[in-house]
C-alpha cells in the first residue's frame, strides 16, 4: 500500500468516528420549567406579597358585587309583587266610587216602597202597578250590587260593631243588652272586605242598677 492510500484510509476512519459521535446534550433534552398555572400551590408560594394582596382585594370586590346583585334581585321581586297586588286591588275596587253614588238611589227606592201603605195597594190599581215597578227596579239594583260583591248591612238586633256601624243615639229602657242595635236609620254597605258606608244605628243603653240601701247584717256568731 502506498503512502497516499494509507493517508486516505486514516482520513476515512477518522470521519466515520466523528459522524457517529453525539454529545450528551443531544441525548438528554432540557426539561421545561414548571408552569405556575398547572401547579397553583407552588405558584402561590412563589407569588410576591403585593400580588397576594391584589388577589384578596379582587375576591372582596367580587363578594361585594355578588351581595349587591342579590339585593337588587330581591328588591326587584318585592317591587313586582307590590305592583301586582296594587293592580289586583285596583281592579277589585274599580267600581267603588260609582257604587257609593248608587247607594243614595237604593235608599230612595227603599223609602219609596216603605211610604206606600199596604192597605192602599189593594184599593188603587195604578198605585199597585207603581209599587210593582219600583220593586222590580230595586231588585235589579240589588242584583247589580251582588254581581259587584256589594252587600247591604242591616244590623238590627246585632251587637254594635264600630267597624261597620255608626251610633247616632242611645235608647234606654229597651230590655236589650247594652250595646245592642235596636234601630237602623240607614243601611250600610260593604264591597268585598272594604266598607263603603257605615250603617246609622241607635244602640240600647244599659239601665243603671239600683243601689242596695239595705244594711248588711252579719249573722255569724
Image: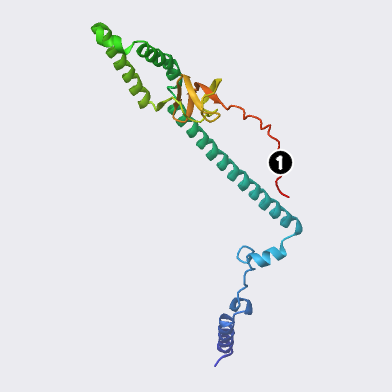
Question: What is the number of callouts on the image?
Answer: 1
The answer to whether residue 8 is above or below residue 211 is below
Q: In this picture, is 14 found above or below 213?
A: below
Along the horizontal axis of the image, is 25 left or right of 114? right
Residue 78 in the image, given as x and y percentages of width and height: 54, 38
Which residue corresponds to the image point at 71% horizontal and 41% vertical from the top-left?
Answer: 217
Q: Up-down: is 129 above or below 47? A: above
Residue 175 horizontal side relative to residue 120, left or right = right
Q: Residues within 10 Å of mark 1 (few under 14, many from 20)?
A: few
Q: Position of residue 176 (x, y in %)?
A: 51, 29
Q: Quadrant of residue 149?
A: top left
* Closest to the observer, 49 or 201: 201
Q: Of all residues shown, which one is farthest toward the left? A: 125
Q: Nearer the viewer, residue 203 or 97?
A: 203
Residue, disc 1: 217
Residue at the location (43% across, 27% down)?
91
Position above or below: 38 against 108:
below
Color theme of the render = rainbow
User: Which quarter of the picture shows residue 45?
Assistant: bottom right
Location of residue 187 (image quadrant): top left
Q: Is residue 27 left or right of residue 140?
A: right
- Front one among 109 and 39: 109
Amino acid at each position: 500500500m502506498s503512502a497516499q492510500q494509507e493517508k486516505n484510509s486514516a482520513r476515512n476512519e477518522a470521519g466515520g468516528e466523528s459522524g457517529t459521535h453525539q454529545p450528551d446534550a443531544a441525548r438528554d433534552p432540557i426539561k421545561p420549567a414548571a408552569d405556575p398555572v398547572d401547579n397553583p400551590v407552588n405558584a402561590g408560594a412563589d407569588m410576591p406579597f403585593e400580588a397576594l394582596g391584589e388577589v384578596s382585594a379582587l375576591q372582596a370586590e367580587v363578594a361585594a358585587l355578588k351581595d349587591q346583585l342579590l339585593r337588587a334581585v330581591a328588591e326587584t321581586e318585592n317591587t313586582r309583587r307590590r305592583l301586582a297586588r296594587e293592580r289586583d286591588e285596583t281592579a277589585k275596587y274599580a267600581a267603588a266610587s260609582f257604587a257609593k253614588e248608587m247607594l243614595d238611589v237604593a235608599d230612595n227606592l227603599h223609602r219609596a216602597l216603605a211610604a206606600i201603605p199596604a192597605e192602599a195597594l189593594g184599593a188603587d190599581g195604578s198605585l199597585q202597578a207603581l209599587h210593582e215597578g219600583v220593586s222590580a227596579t230595586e231588585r235589579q239594583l240589588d242584583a247589580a250590587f251582588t254581581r259587584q260583591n256589594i252587600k247591604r248591612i242591616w244590623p238590627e238586633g246585632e251587637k254594635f260593631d264600630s267597624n261597620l256601624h255608626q251610633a247616632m243615639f242611645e235608647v234606654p229602657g229597651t230590655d236589650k243588652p247594652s250595646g245592642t242595635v235596636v234601630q237602623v236609620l240607614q243601611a250600610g254597605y260593604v264591597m268585598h272586605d272594604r266598607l263603603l258606608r257605615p250603617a246609622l244605628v241607635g244602640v240600647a243603653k244599659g239601665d243603671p242598677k239600683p243601689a242596695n240601701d239595705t244594711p248588711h247584717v252579719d249573722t255569724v256568731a
